[in-house]
Image (spheres, helix red, strand yellow):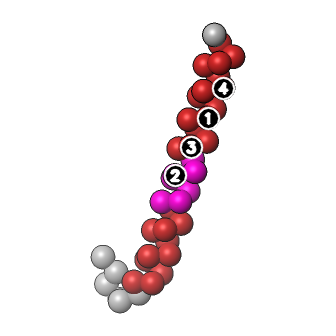
Amino acid sequence: MAGDGNIEAHEATYATITALFKWSAISLFLIALIVMWLIS
C-alpha cells in the first residue's frame, strides 16, 4: 500500500503496468500464431 497517501501515483503506475502486460500478451500470442503457421 501507499504509505504516504500518494495513491494517484500508485494508480497511474498500476494502470501503465497492466496496459503494458496486456499488449505484451497480445503481441506474444500473435507471434506464436505466426510461428505455428510458418512451421505447419
Closer to the chain start, of discs 2 and 4, is 2
Residue type, mark 2 in image: Lys
**Residue carrying label 2:** 22
Residue type, mark 3 in image: Ile
Left or right: residue 5 compared with residue 11: left
**Residue carrying label 3:** 26
Closer to the chain start, of discs 2 and 1, is 2
Distance CA(mark 3)–CA(mark 1) = 6 Å
Mark 2 Cα shell of 10 Å, populated few (<14), some (14-19), many (≥20): few
Image location of residue 25, percent across then percent down:
53, 44
- Is residue 31 a member of the stretch shown in magenta? no
Mark 4 Cα shell of 10 Å, populated few (<14), some (14-19), many (≥20): few
Location of residue 39 (image quadrant)? top right
Q: Secondary structure at mark 4?
A: helix
Residue type, mark 1 in image: Leu
Residue depicted at 63% across the width and 32% down the height:
31
Mark 3 and mark 2 in contact? Answer it, CB < 8 Å: yes
**Residue carrying label 4:** 34
Q: Identify whether 12 is placed above or below 38.
A: below
